[in-house]
Image: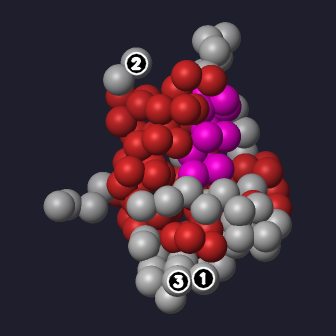
Amino acid sequence: METTERRQEAIERKHAGYNCCQAVLCAFADQTEYTEEQLFKMGAAFGVGMGGLEGTCGALIGAELLLGLTAGERPVMRDARMLHKAFTEACGASLCKDLKGRDTGKVLCPCDDCVRRAVDLIEEKTKGE
């Protein structure tokens, strides 16, 4: 599968020290009314599953935030549920600790792949409108 430019940008940001949420958010700066710096700050607390608590994956949170930031006036709850379901099916879980195999020793989806999936899901959603 060919890597899109936006996916690659998000992965490069992740490798440059952005957390997963920031990497996803900032890769879509051109599609929001916010600057990259504002998006970076917005995603700062969502590393390692929401503030380091190993909760919801930061890449998924970034994708969910983008739903709201790009929705205009339309409601997003249904889309958010669909995005969460699609991410969970693709990655095997939605919690960081489960994705990283903290309790089982089995990694379901590495961070880079979570970021790629989140970017793909948002791209699919924004193209479908």
Q: Is residue 106 above or below residue 68?
A: below
Expressed as whole percent of the image width and height from the top left, the position of residue 89 reads 38, 51
User: If the image is split into quadrants, where does the N terminus sit?
Assistant: bottom left
Q: Which of labels 1 and 2 is toward the front?
A: 1
Local packing at callout 3 (Cα closer than 10 Å; few below 14, some 14-19, many 20+) is few
| Residue that extends furthest to the left in the rendered view of this protein | 1
Q: Please, is residue 82 above or below residue 1 in the view?
A: above
Q: Residue under label 2, please give it.
A: 129
Q: CA distance from mark 3 to mark 2?
A: 39 Å
Residue 122, numbered label: none
Quadrant where the C terminus sits is: top left
Q: Is residue 32 magenta?
A: no
Numbered disc in front, either 3 or 2: 3
Residue topped by disc 1: 103
Q: Amino acid at mark 2?
A: Glu
Q: In front: 45, or 18?
A: 45
Q: Position of residue 84 (x, y in %)?
A: 52, 42
Q: Amino acid at mark 3?
A: Thr
Q: What span is in magenta?
A: 60-70
Left or right placement of residue 118 versus residue 14 in this view: left
Q: Which residue is mark 3?
A: 104
Q: Nearer the viewer, residue 109 or 26?
A: 109
Secondary element at image label 3:
loop
Task: Decide if residue 78 is in sight here.
Answer: yes
First reached walking from the N terminus: tag 1 or tag 2: 1
Q: CA distance from mark 1 to mark 2?
A: 39 Å
